[in-house]
Amino acid sequence: MNNDVIESTLKVGTVGEEMTDSVQAINSGTSIATIKGLMAEFAINHLPVVDDGHIVGLVTDRDLKLAQAVSSDPNFHNSATAREVLVAPYVTAPDTPLDDVLTVMLQRRIGSAIVVEHGVLLGIFTRNDACRVLVRLLRGTVTND
C-alpha cells in the first residue's frame, strides 16, 4: 500500500477530538511549591496559567527546572510564582486539524498545545496525547473516512 492510499483512507481528526479536557490550570500568583505539588499529584508536566478567565501563559516542568537552576534565591521554591516562570503557550482552536497542531509542536519543539474557544480554556493536547493517537494509528484503529 503506497503513502497516497494510506493518507486518503485514514482520518485522524481535530485537536479537540484528541485533547485532554480535564485540564488542571493555575493563576499567575500560584507559588512554585504549589505548582510542583500539582504536577506531582496529577502526574502532569504542563499547567496553563489563567487570570480573569483568560490564558496568560503556561508553566512547564522544564521551565521550572531551568528557572530554579538560574535563580540565586535560596527560597525560590516558596517565594517565586507562576508569573516569574510562565512562557507564552501555543494556543489553538478545537477544530484545528491534528496534523497542523503536531507540525507546529514539532517545529517549535514544544510539548503541548492549549485548546481554547472564544477565550475559554477547553483542554490541552500534549506529547502523551500524540502518543495515544500514534498507537491507535499503528494498531489500525484510527477512524476511516
Image: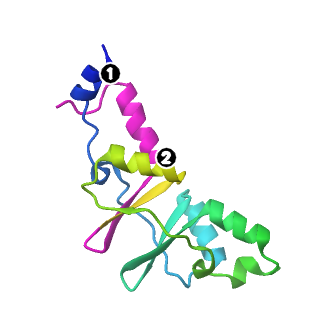
Residue 130, percent across and down? 43, 43
Amino acid type for the residue under numbered disc 1: Asn
Q: Decide which of 13, 122 is in the foreground and name it.
A: 13
Residue extending farthest top:
1
Q: Quadrant of residue 16?
A: bottom left
In the picture provided, is 35 more to the left or to the right than 18? Answer: right
Residue 53, percent across and down? 36, 81
Q: Residue at x 58, y 78 (%)?
A: 82
The residue that mark 1 highlights is 3
* Placement of 73 over or under 133, stated as above or below: below
Q: How many marks?
A: 2
Residue extending farthest left:
145
Q: Residues within 10 Å of mark 2 (few under 14, many from 20)?
A: few
Q: Which mark is residue 106?
A: 2
Is there CB contact under 8 Å for labels 2 and 1?
A: no
Describe the colour scheme in one phrase: rainbow
Residue 52, percent across and down? 38, 86
Residue 28, percent across and down? 53, 82
Give the mark nearer the N terminus: 2 vs 1: 1
Secondary structure beneath dot 1 equals helix
Name the quadrant of the C terminus.
top left
Q: Residue at x 82, y 78 (%)?
A: 72
In the rendered structure, which segment of residues is drawn in magenta?
A: 117-145
Q: Quadrant of residue 31?
A: bottom right
Q: CA distance from mark 2 to mark 1?
A: 21 Å
Amino acid type for the residue under numbered disc 2: Leu
Q: Quadrant of residue 23?
A: bottom left
